[in-house]
Image (cartoon, rainbow, N blue to C red):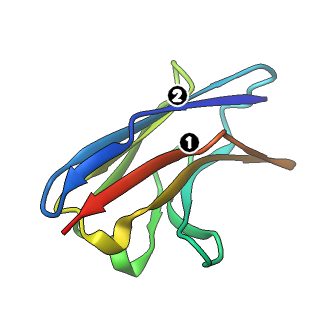
Amino acid sequence: VQLQASGGGLVQAGGSLRLSCAASGDIVSSAIMGWYRQAPEKQRELVASITRGGSVKYADSVKGRFTISRDNAKNTVSLQMNNLKPEDTAVYYCNYIWGHEYWGQGTLVTVSS
């Protein structure tokens, strides 16, 4: 499984960004897909995840601001990030879980105050 992430960049606090990730290879539609992030000198943490059926999970810190979605036909997962805060600054990683765990290459999100 290969994961190709796009989006990210520099935005001012209060702004919005959208991350997208496309999965390819030996894809199983029942896989859980999601986004993690890792800020400097911090551990990688779950941001949001979504099942094939649309069940979602969010980190408390992003609830009400971020929305995860997926397109099962296109094998893509997206993360709409609104009202961004400086503490959201991190490298964001796309994640795919089915038996094994797979990671995208990471995309940097920088939120300036």
Residue topped by disc 1 = 52
Q: Is residue 76 visible?
A: yes
Q: Is residue 63 visible?
A: no
Report x, y in % for residue 58. Answer: 43, 68
Query: Disc 2 residue type?
Result: Asn
Contact flag, marks 2 and 1 (Cβ < 8 Å):
yes
Query: Disc 1 residue type?
Result: Arg
* Quarter placement of the C terminus: bottom left
Q: Which mark is residue 113?
A: none
Counting other residues with Cα less than 10 Å from the Cα at mark 1, is it few (<14), some (14-19), or many (20 or more)?
A: some
Q: Which mark is residue 72?
A: 2
Report x, y in % for residue 75. Answer: 57, 25
Tell me the residue at 69%/42% (across/down): 31
Report x, y in % for residue 62. Answer: 33, 70
Residue 7 shown left or right of residue 3 in the figure: left
> What separation in Å lies between label 2 and label 1 (alpha carbons)?
7 Å
**Callout 1: SS:** loop
Tell me the residue at 77%/19% (across/down): 25
Report x, y in % for residue 52. Answer: 56, 42
